[in-house]
Amino acid sequence: MKKITNYLREHTILLALLLMLLLLFVTTGRFRSLDNFLSILQEASFIGIAGIGMTFCIITGGLDLSSGSMIALLAVINMLILNATNSFLAVLAVLLLGAVLGAFNGVLVAKVRIPAFIATLAAFYVFRALAYIITGGNPVSYSAPWFIWLGNGKVLGIPFSFLLMLVLAFLAHLLLRRTRIGRTVIAVGNSPEASRISGLNNDRAVIFAFMMAGLGVAVSSVLVSSRLWSANPRMMDGYEFKVITAVVLGGTALEGGRGSIFNTVTAAVFYCGISNAMTLYRIDSYVINIITGMILLLAFSLNPIMQIMEERKNKAEAGNVKAGGGR
């Protein structure tokens, strides 16, 4: 029983997702269509893939607010290079650029000692401005069939982008849990000082975490621009908050040291499922913004609430031990 309780506590978002799906399947006929469900999985992949990288970042105790602007910048650069070269190498170049931009954010945080909030907020403005400067504020399109397939294609009826998210989640999980750099990321989040005393390279771990965040955004930028056949400097405004919400809803602690890649992916599906349901129910867009804000508030409140409950539980157990010893 205790194992089941611990599992449910660690995977609360999975239980929430199953309950939401059950409720919507019963109450909304249009939600039950296969096309609608596949659409949710596809949209979730755009958030979830960036969320995988963001999970590394938040586990260190950091935060990347530049995701939305970075995805716009990378998407327009991708389109411009594709138009100039018509080569898959353009996609690889954008993935590399995303990793470099993420690592640059990490250097500002780890080496220059600028707080992550400030460093990535500055990048938020810089990246979006660069996207406008590069394009002159105009959209850029590219419609080669192979590129369009990346964001719209299916494998055995399942969106390729969703399958890619699952593969990347599995690889990221192994990287986080089974490698030295992944364990260092977790150690830095738990206690930077203890990690440093243990001889671990904190700066390298932080830079690596931000690099992973940038790489996740780069992959999403390719998929989103492929999905739309185009990119523009105004795209994905507010995207960073959706990504952070998915990560935190998945149980990753904002103070660092704890997180789950698979819970982040599950939370992305949950978030997109709710958004889809609100659209099907024809809820006013302003009300949708209110509900989205409440979800964001809930996401940021879960960890403190769970921490308080855990502290009370530990105190109660300590009290029982003392009482037992007294008798």
Image (cartoon, helix red, strand yellow):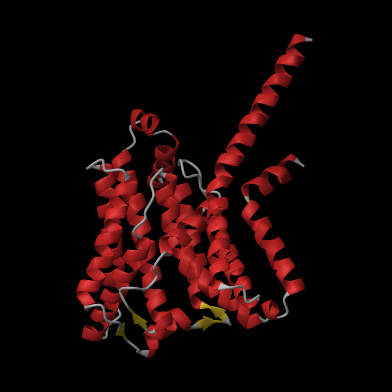
Q: Residue at x 50, y 55 (%)?
A: 247
Q: Is residue 156 above or below residue 129?
A: below
Quadrant for residue 147, please give it: bottom left
Can you see residue 262? no
> How many numbered marks are there?
0
Identify which residue, 192 or 302, lies in the foreground: 302
Q: Residue at x 35, y 89 (%)?
A: 143
Question: Is 298 on the left-hand or right-hand side of 125?
Answer: right
Question: Is 38 on the left-hand or right-hand side of 257?
Answer: right
Q: Residue furthest right?
A: 327
Q: Residue at x 30, y 44 (%)?
A: 204
Q: Residue at x 29, y 41 (%)?
A: 203
Q: Is residue 35 above or below residue 95?
A: below
Q: Is residue 54 above or below residue 73?
A: above
Residue 167 rendering spot, x and y as whole percentages: 49, 66
Quadrant for residue 230, please give it: bottom left
Residue 98 rendering spot, x and y as whole percentages: 30, 64
Residue 154 rendering spot, x and y as whole percentages: 52, 82
Residue 325 rendering spot, x and y as whole percentages: 74, 12
Can you see residue 174? yes
Question: Is 45 on the left-hand or right-hand side of 199?
Answer: right
Q: Give the quarter of the figure containing the C terminus.
A: top right
Q: Give the quarter of the figure containing the N terminus.
A: top right
